[in-house]
Amino acid sequence: MLPFSYVRPAHVAAAVAAHTQDGEPRYLAGGQSLLPALKLRLAQPSLLIDVARLPELSALRREGERLVVGAAVTHSALAACPHIPALAQLAGSIGDLQVRNMGSLGGALANADPASDHAAALLGLGAEIRTDRRVIAADDFFLGMFETALEPGELIIEIAFPLPNRAAYAKVRNPASGYPVVGIFVAEAADGIRVAVTGAASSPYRLSEFEMALAGDFSAAALEGLSVPAEDLNRDLHATHEYRAALIPVLAKRALNCGRKP
Amino acid sequence: MRVAFTLNGKAVEAEVEPRTLLVDLLRQTLLLSGTHVGCDTGQCGACTVHLDGRAVKSCLVLAVQADGRTVLTIEGVAAGEALHPLQEAFRDRHALQCGFCTPGMIMSGLDLVTHLDKADETAIREGLAGNLCRCTGYRPIIEAIAACIGEKG
Ligand SMILES: Cc1cc2nc3c(=O)[nH]c(=O)nc-3n(C[C@H](O)[C@H](O)[C@H](O)COP(=O)(O)OP(=O)(O)OC[C@H]3O[C@@H](n4cnc5c(N)ncnc54)[C@H](O)[C@@H]3O)c2cc1C
Ligand code: FES
Ligand code: FES
């Protein structure tokens, strides 16, 4: 790793102020995506601003019909939170035990890996992202591969997930990396049916065709005969685009059948 | 930068560069070489230590991130000459051969012993997903951890 400076501000205002310095400042949460990138010199920040212990980023509370999760809450802590079982199960399936103990929800979302598990939950539940300056709807958050709507220096404070009537997540993991080859989050969410896909394209997206099919009948049977075109999907050494296209309806049905006998 | 934290029950202080990894501080400056480095890329789990009671990969943590917190390494697991029950279980069940992965396996295993309510094999296997072993085939490691969880209840 190339040298950098490090600060650990006590409050959000000081963290955001530190990010206005010259050079290339960068927030650091759990470091589970950033440190590997620094080791590979994919990023060369001049300053790391540690936000993992900011008190304003540590929420984990019910707020009416929402679950509010601080950006610095670890995947492990979220996995132990009972309010949205599908979200807890998803968080508990990320990477491995040690990664879940360090990695945070805010870091995962800001990183915007095209195969991020949390991205599927964010879109699938129609959450909102509260930053130091505004509120961003999930549908407006992911712009492309590793690209989000966050402005330079914009800090995620917390994420508000509306409680769904029902929700489930199903994925096929890459056995080496653990990341999803494809992951599908389905929900009867507060604002209607949502079906979100991660791992299949350059950034996570919603499947409106599937959502419409499920609007009248929230069951695997409603998806019978539906397929997705393969052309625009990811192809890499782990899976072809045709394979990813084939996985999407299979995993959507698996998620819908979750908790029922096959 | 100055870092100060609790290491295996004792207060320690050290001067580090911000880019120093926790594993390098432990092994090279504090001379605790029980924590191993197998890959340095976050894949193998040989470098696993506890940070505030949870297993983390010390090759993916900066030393400055441990400032003011509590770190436990393999050297702090036994009480003097008396092995921890999980270490006893590893010895009794031949859960180590070359021993390279063992410090990391014990530290992840301790997290599982603390946080799992029952000795469920699937949960133990899933909990060890971040620890690679080239020798044992995992079965005796899983049995040792299961035995230790069993004794707890
Ligand atoms: C071995 C391994 C396996 C993994 N497997 C998976 C997997 O299966 N599925 C999966 O989804 N992920 C996986 N991950 C990634 C993991 O989920 C990371 O925890 C997560 O992507 C980043 O969270 P972090 O807290 O570590 O963020 P960091 O690495 O600290 O930061 C990541 C990025 O987010 C920015 N950032 C951090 N916090 C904020 C904030 N509050 N506001 C704005 N920007 C912020 C940082 O500047 C940086 O650019 C894996 C990682 C490893 C090392
Ligand atoms: S040395 Fe840290 S995970 Fe391999
Ligand atoms: S005992 Fe040799 S690597 Fe596990």
Image: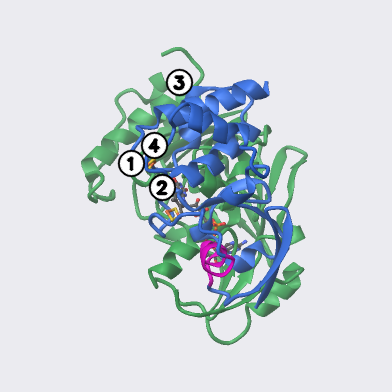
Chain colours: A green, B blue
Residue on which disc 4 sits? A209
Question: Which residue is drawn at the image coordinates 71% and 41% (left, top)?
Answer: A66
Label 2 marks which chain's residue?
A: B
Left or right of A181 in this view: A35: right
How packed mark 3 is, by other alpha carbons closer than 10 Å (few <14, some 14-19, many 20 or more), is some
The residue carrying mark 2 is B100
The residue tagged 3 is A257
For the residue labelled by badge 3, is the local secondary structure a helix, a strand or a loop?
loop
> CA gap, disc 3 to disc 1?
37 Å
Which amino acid does the dot numbered 3 rest on? Asn
Disc 1: which residue: B134
Give the x, y percent position of residue B49: 57, 51
User: Rounded to the nearest whole Å, what is the CA distance between mark 3 and mark 2?
Assistant: 43 Å
Q: Looking at the image, can residue B25 be seen?
A: yes
Q: Is residue A168 visible?
A: no
Above or below: residue A243 compared with residue A37: above
Query: Residue A67 in the image: x percent, y percent?
Result: 70, 41
At label 4, counting other C-alpha atoms closer than 10 Å, the crowd grade (few under 14, some 14-19, many 20 or more) is few
Q: Is residue A166 above or below residue A53?
A: above
Q: Judge depth for marks 1 and 4 and give the one in front.
A: 1
Label 1: element kind: loop
Disc on the earlier residue, 4 or 3:
4
**Mark 3, chain letter?**
A
* Amino acid type assigned to the residue bearing label 1 in the image: Arg
Most extreme residue toward the front, as rendered? B81
Q: Residue at 65% across / 62% down in the picture?
A: B66
CA gap, disc 2 and disc 4: 51 Å
Beta carbon at label 2 within 8 Å of ligand 3: yes
Q: Does A84 sit above or below residue A102? A: above
Element on which disc 2 rests = loop
Foreground label between 3 and 2: 2
Cβ–Cβ below 8 Å for labels 1 and 2? yes
